[in-house]
């Protein structure tokens, strides 16, 4: 009997853990039987060594697989979360320097100037800006500059504004000038000696010239109000040099400046 019990323990160790403890009992109908004698006691000696050890489940019991340790239900799949793709509306606004790079600021040379025949304050100039024909530009400078200061002078021109009709004359650009806070004194911006008509002006160091973007079209400048966004940041320094913030206005020959106005606004 002791040998049979040891065999029973060995069988139990080989089985998966069951919900209820194993018990040793006599075989009965529909019950679990772990130990049974050989079919004929006459032909088999009464020895625990010759007992047939077997494990069986009753028909009404759950299967061995079901009776094994129950597995926890599978966890719900965790969906991979991806960071949202920023839309165009979430992109940062362009900087003032980037907007200034869209302006077509050029060196020009006044070929001819005269008083506007239908208005009191504008001059009319023909300005060489490096194109096939000089541009016609109207400038309200009669009350500030004698006409002699315009004739045959190098100037700075904002060249990608939409043309405007000035009392019957279409003005195609703007001469850039510095003025004091009261707007009583106005001076033209002057490129360094050696600058040539048509070359593009930029802001910053000499190395930044190559990073300059292509100018926007006149329609884009008007629609996006590029000039209106840049102009408040233009001024002259204590040395009368034209700057955008802390970036100096340059041509291939050097800096752009005015004669004497310090800390003046540029327009």
Image: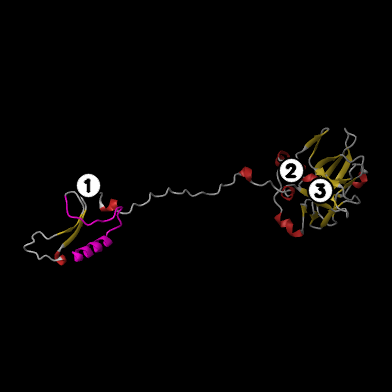
Q: Position of residue 101 (x, y in %)?
A: 73, 50
Verify whether residue 26 appears in magenta. yes
Given residues 49 and 60, the one toward you in this image is: 49
Determine the secondary structure under disc 3.
strand
Do callouts 3 and 2 mark residues in contact (Cβ within 8 Å)?
no
Query: Toward which corner of the image does residue 69 lie, by quadrant?
Result: bottom left
Residue 246 position within the rendered picture, expressed as x and y whole percent measured from the top left: 80, 54
Query: Residue 164: which disc?
Result: none
In this figure, which residue is indicated by the disc labeled 1?
60
Q: Earlier in the sequence, mark 3 or mark 2?
A: 2
**Disc nearer the start of the sequence (1/2):** 1
The boundaries of the magenta stretch are 1-28
Q: Which residue is mark 3?
A: 234
Place residue 40 in its image quadrant: bottom left
Could you tell me which secondary element the residue under label 1 belongs to? Answer: loop
Q: Quadrant of residue 12?
A: bottom left
């Amino acid at each position: 009997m002791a040998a049979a019990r040891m065999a029973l323990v060995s069988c139990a160790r080989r089985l998966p853990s069951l919900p209820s403890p194993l018990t040793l009992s006599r075989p009965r109908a529909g019950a679990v039987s772990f130990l049974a004698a050989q079919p004929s006691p006459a032909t088999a000696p009464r020895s625990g060594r010759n007992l047939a050890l077997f494990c069986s489940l009753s028909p009404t019991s759950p299967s061995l697989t079901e009776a094994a340790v129950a597995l926890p239900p599978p966890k719900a799949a965790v969906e991979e979360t991806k960071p949202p793709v920023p839309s165009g509306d979430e992109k940062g606004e362009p900087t003032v320097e980037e907007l200034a790079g869209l302006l077509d600021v050029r060196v020009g040379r006044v070929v001819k100037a005269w008083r506007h025949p239908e208005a009191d304050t504008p001059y009319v100039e023909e300005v060489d800006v490096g194109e096939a024909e000089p541009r016609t530009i109207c400038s309200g400078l009669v009350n500030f500059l004698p006409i002699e200061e315009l004739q045959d002078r190098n100037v700075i021109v904002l060249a990608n504004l939409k043309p405007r009709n000035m009392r019957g004359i279409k003005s195609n650009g703007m001469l850039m000038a510095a003025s004091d806070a009261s707007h009583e004194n106005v001076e033209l911006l002057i490129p360094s000696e050696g600058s040539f008509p048509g070359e593009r002006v930029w802001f910053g160091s000499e190395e930044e010239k190559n990073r300059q973007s292509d100018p926007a079209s006149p329609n884009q400048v008007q629609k996006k109000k590029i000039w209106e966004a840049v102009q408040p940041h233009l001024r002259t320094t204590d040395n009368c040099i034209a700057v955008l913030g802390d970036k100096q206005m340059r041509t291939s020959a050097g800096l752009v400046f005015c004669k004497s106005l310090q800390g003046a606004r540029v327009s």
